[in-house]
Amino acid sequence: MKTNYLLVLLVFCSLLLFQCSESVKTEKPNILLICIDDLRPELKSFGADYIVSPNIDALAKNGVSFQKHFVNAPSCGPSRYTLLTGQYGSANNDALFRRSYQISAGDKSVNPSMPEWFRTHGYTTVSVGKVSHHPGGRGGENWNDSTIIEMPNAWDKHLLPVSEWQHPRGVMHGLAHGEIREIANEMDVFQSAEGDDNIYPDGAITDEALNQIRVLSEDKEKPFFLAVGIIKPHLPFGAPKKYYDLYEGVKLLEIKHPQKPEGITTWHASGEFMKYNRWGKDPNTDAEFAKEVRRHYAASVSYADAQVGKVLAELKRTGADKNTIVLLWGDHGWHLGEHAIWGKHSLFEESLHSPMIIHYPGMKQHGQKTNTIVETLDVFPTLCELTGIEAPEFAQGTSLLEILENPNSKKDHLAVAYNSNVATIRTTTHRLLLHKNGFVELYDSTTEAGETKNIADQYPELVGELKQALKAKLGFTEDGI
């Protein structure tokens, strides 16, 4: 009898240990990364009171919003390179494809990407939409060649439903009902067509994201890393008319510093915007047209926000939200007339400042805003620390957990960014830009003049300090890049 009792006890303990091991196996949190293209901090939760963005604002109320987040490059490709590799890289849009070519050539010095890192640590990794530079993550003429992979070894599945837009290139620059960009000046720069969310490409992307959440949440064995890339508000500005109607009669604030800057600066001519059909109008000289552009941008933001709402609602419906880190990220900012620029690609504040929000299970700070300067480079080590996975030594950023736990932290951060000819560093008070030929711009971010008055000649010591900081971070020479 005693033997039978001990046997039953042994079996019970074994089952208990097995169940414990199973619970430990599923404890690691999932990751939902939401990337939004060309999204400046034009959200109510980031101070743009006229914007209708209830779903992103709700996420901000449930997490911590980084009001001073800066990307590391003002273009889609290099900014996403930094996010997805945790390293500074090429300033060109083909940054991730260059990395892919290195891998194909057998270059062993290429480090794993962020999704690959999590994949090797037991995660199922899936991307939907525009996560890397090409929606769907493939190359070729129409971005659908499965022999040319933008991020080798990163994703278990990298998905892009093209619906009636024919191919990923069509989705990227699509308007309503399957219209794709063939000749830019024959496509309208903005549009608001009647219909539901699926008359534009992000509707199909969102539907696939919902499907992936359902599938991934059913797997109790492995955590998931799901990245969802929403294309709007990228050009051309297109959204169902119901979102444009939200801004009918809304009074827009005056454009701050609308003049083209004088002298040597990081200004550019907004070529991407200007090549579309604008009906012969220029927003820099036509105030009413400028307002229409801004309203259509706002409509595209509200449309993107609605897609975020669907994704978060499905996450909650499945119950996966209880064990999922959610990180929402804008890949860079966008000028709406500041410095007479309509687009990105400059190294002014408007191109580099984008929203970032983080929520994770068990966090104690909810609805908090932090004004500590952070950069996209910090995402990789932050997700590692939040999941309990060791951060790789090659990741060049800093975990933001300390700030998430104490949003009022005054921890001094510096944010750097670059294009092909200029690099910049942002402190809490100043922005310095260093040109390849050694020319320097210095702006006081605390003044009304902001980035319109170059004060480099007045503060040679500060210029020297910030040049040294750039040198330390990016490997510049003393006098230039």
Image (cartoon, helix red, strand yellow):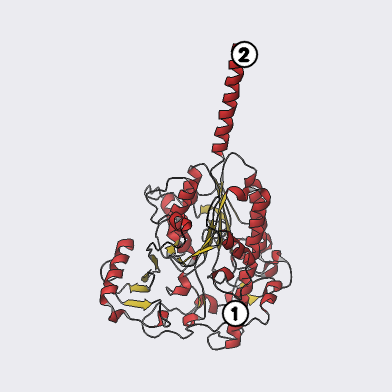
- Does residue 152 show up? no
Residue at 74% from the left image edge and 69% from the top image edge: 195
N-term mark: 2 or 1? 2
Residue at 59% from the left image edge and 82% from the top image edge: 252
Q: Nearer the viewer, residue 109 or 361?
A: 361
Q: Nearer the viewer, residue 373 or 232?
A: 373
Determine contact: label 2, label 1, CB under 8 Å: no
The image quadrant that residue 412 belongs to is: bottom left
Query: Image quadrant for the C terminus?
Result: bottom left
Q: Which labelled disc corresponds to residue 293? A: 1
Q: Is residue 457 left or right of residue 395?
A: left
Looking at the picture, which amino acid does disc 2 mark? Asn
Q: Is residue 55 above or below residue 251?
A: above
Looking at the picture, which amino acid does disc 1 mark? Val
Q: Which residue is mark 2?
A: 4
On the image, the x and y values in percent for residue 344 come to: 49, 73
**Other residues around mark 2 within 10 Å, as few (<14) / some (14–19) / many (≥20):** few
On the image, the x and y values in percent for residue 264 come to: 36, 81
Q: Is residue 191 left or right of residue 472?
A: right
User: How far apart are labels 2 and 1 at the CA level?
Assistant: 80 Å
Q: Is residue 188 above or below residue 397?
A: below
On the image, the x and y values in percent for residue 116 come to: 48, 48
Query: Image quadrant for the N terminus?
Result: top right
The image quadrant that residue 458 belongs to is: bottom left
On the image, the x and y values in percent for residue 48 come to: 57, 74
